[in-house]
Amino acid sequence: MQIENWQVQEDLKYDSNNFWVEIKGQQALIGLSDYGQWVIGDILYLDLAPEGATIVRGEKFGSVESGKWVGNLIAPVNGRVLECNPLVVSEPRQIQVDPYGTGWILKVELASDDEIGSLLDHAEYAEFIKEQVKNAV
């Protein structure tokens, strides 16, 4: 689904911090949405929670530095970090090249089956983007 200039994948869940979550059983891949990477700008550096760390929904799991600003990465789910994507750690701009593919950020083991309940589906996230764009004008 195309919203303005950004792709929203229909098979993913999203949060209001512009992360996508792909659920596979008790594991999830997490990355920045196409819109999220655009908002951040040219990503120069990532600092991520290490493998084995516990992440808590709504709390910081890392930071990002771009040409525009330095900010926190906020966890969309609760879980334990299984893997940090070594490609985006060494080449953070890969997030802009392929946000829904090779630009994923973390793989986590979900804390519970209830994790996806607070996430947005693609249609809800598309409406969220439209609101953000409208409010920015």
Image (cartoon, grey):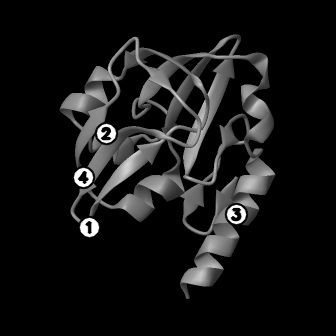
Residue occupying the point 24% across, 52% down: 65
If you read the primary sequence from the N terminus, does the residue marked by circle 3 or circle 2 appear first? 2
**In the image, residue 112 lies at what x, y percent?**
72, 17
| Mark drawn on residue 89 | none
Q: Which residue is mark 3?
A: 128
| Mark 1: secondary structure | loop
Mark 2 nearby-residue class (10 Å; few <14, some 14–19, many ≥20): some
Q: Residue furthest bottom?
A: 137
Q: Quadrant of residue 136?
A: bottom right
If you read the primary sequence from the N terminus, does the residue marked by circle 1 or circle 2 appear first? 1
| Mark drawn on residue 94 | 2
The correct choice, above or below, for 1 with respect to 31 in the image is below
Q: Which residue is mark 1?
A: 68
Q: Amino acid at mark 1?
A: Lys
Q: Which residue is mark 4?
A: 65
Q: Amino acid at mark 3?
A: Phe
**In the image, residue 47 lies at what x, y percent?**
26, 36
Rounded to the nearest angstrom, the CA distance separating label 1 from label 2 is 17 Å
Mark 4 nearby-residue class (10 Å; few <14, some 14–19, many ≥20): some
Q: Are marks 1 and 2 in contact (CB under 8 Å)?
A: no
